[in-house]
Amino acid sequence: MSQRFQSYIDGRWIAGADSAADENPSDLGSPVGEYGSLNAAQVNEAIAAAAQAQRAWGLSSPQQRADALDFVGSEILARKEELGRLLAQEEGKTLPESIGEAARAGQIFKFFAGEALRIPGEKLASTRPGVDVEITREPVGVVGIIAPWNFPLAIPAWKIAPALAYGNAVVFKPAEIVPGCAWALAEILSRAGLPAGVFNLAIGSGRVVGQALVENRGIDALSFTGSVPTGNRLLKQAAERGLKIQLEMGGKNPLVVLADADLDKAVEIAVNGAYFSTGQRCTASSRLIVEAPVYDEFIARTRKRLQQIKVGNALAQGVDIGPVASRSQLETDLSYLEIARSEGAELLHGGELLELDTPGHYLSPALIAAQPQHRIAREEVFGPVAAVLRADDYEHALALANDTEFGLCAGIATTSLKYATHFKRHAQAGMVMVNLPTAGVDPHVPFGGRKASSYGPREQGRYAVEFYTTVKTAYTSA
Ligand code: TXE
């Protein structure tokens, strides 16, 4: 019998109503398991349990919270191969990438175990004689977490770990197509010594479970990663009721390749950033902006490199790129290839559906020569699809890089200190990479973007304290 991935409310496992298959995008005949969805009443029950449990948890000793998070981090790290295998089966990332993501999730829990013991505060002299001023950080309360499918262990980790470290209770809603990873994480959290109700997992649809999280006034803050339309809808609803909200959304991240770059290195950075993890990273380099003198040579070398890339079953050895995560994402990818063609962009490589030993959503990496106004050069596809643009010179390349509604990450390949320094300063993005792929960030430093990519305080590292706490200023006269 296949495994059923359950929700977790107030310390109890809840099967959920209907039954849906948890698909394996590398092998559509062999689902990973099945799951049931919660209804709105059950989500409201989870929120009520969280609100009840948070009162004591918010006053618990930092050591208790540190120990719980350290336990979770240690177990994830000890089981990273097994958890990585589940992730690879469910999301379609290659096994090495999946194991890497599991390890990262473990490290994030370890990092915030330490942060639980280092909650910052300040003490200042008042402007009034004989008065002290203390600035302390307190938990926000109950945090709703809505996560996407593309990093089904790491993104939940970087939201759940700080939420718990700073004394909040959590109701976590994973994306529909990755209930297995969410369940595995919840199963570890259920044994970490957290009081019942402090952590809750609510599996189900965005329409029911996600909506309940934004509508129920028991939720004090909402952290979301996903698409721009959903994020913007949540932002409006949050504004109407004064809900603290943080959004991480799309990207159309530029990688500028200058004529002075080490071209082989630039090609490697471009291929890694654009196509690894099947291009399903919000930081993927989906716009390659190449300076005219090396444009033809860059394309020739990139095509040659793409011919060596192996697309295949996420669990198979030697595979560079796994399948697209779901049928609907594959349909989106194919529709953008069609849009590109119809607008006159030129397909230089790939973009073909592949039939392999196991039936799956396999798409060969697509490289498309585009003009800046083409939709393929402006809209997030979220697949193994990159547009390449020609730039006259550095100034033109920088202008093209910034000519986007998004602002998550921007990269440059160059050997020039002058241009690298200028680009770091002038790229309109939350993160900048010099001679590195736009995708691939460290877990202990802030993550997030500008413009339409993000809203609210940064995630990860010490900067996470901003969203997951609220500040209190206390005045004392002796
Ligand atoms: O996103 P959704 P999807 C982008 C990417 C991708 C597209 C669609 O372009 O092709 O989004 O992905 C929940 N109220 N990114 O469909 O729908 C949903 O259940 C409350 C980029 O997965 O935004 C899931 O848990 N919640 C991004 C989460 O929102 C709702 C990463 C995200 O789903 C809801 C992922 C509602 N009305 C997708 N509707 C990145 N750049 O990192 C849905 N949800």
Image: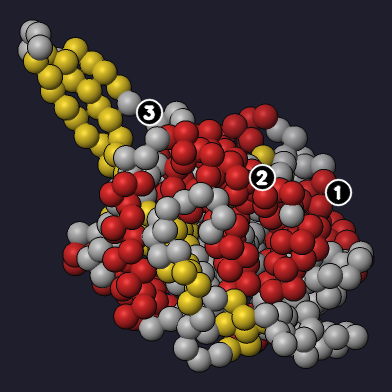
Q: Residues within 10 Å of mark 1 (few under 14, many from 20)?
A: few
Sequence order check, earlier mark of 3 and 1: 3
Nearer to me, 124 or 294: 124
Q: Which residue is mark 1?
A: 264
Q: In the image, what residue type sits under mark 3? A: Pro
Mark 3 to mark 2 CA distance (whole Å)? 25 Å
Residue at point 42% right, 58% down?
196
- Left/right placement of residue 439 relative to residue 308 reads left
Q: Which residue is mark 2?
A: 74
> Element type at marker 1?
helix
Mark 2 to mark 1 CA distance (whole Å)? 39 Å
Residue at point 66% right, 45% down?
74
> Element type at marker 3?
loop
Q: Residues within 10 Å of mark 3 (few under 14, many from 20)?
A: few
Q: In the image, what residue type sits under mark 2? A: Ser
Nearer to me, 264 or 170: 170
User: Can residue 419 be spotted in the picture?
Assistant: yes
Residue 192 at x, y percent in the picture: 55, 50
- Left/right placement of residue 178 relative to residue 454 reads right
Residue 19 at x, y percent in the picture: 56, 90
Position above or below: 325 against 190:
below
Residue 226 at x, y percent in the picture: 48, 67
Label tally: 3
- Quadrant of the image occupied by residue 205: bottom left
Nearer to me, 117 or 213: 117
Sequence order check, earlier mark of 3 and 2: 2
Check residue 120 in the rendering and tell me which mark sits there, or answer none: 3
Q: Quadrant of the N terminus?
A: bottom right
Mark 3 to mark 1 CA distance (whole Å)? 45 Å
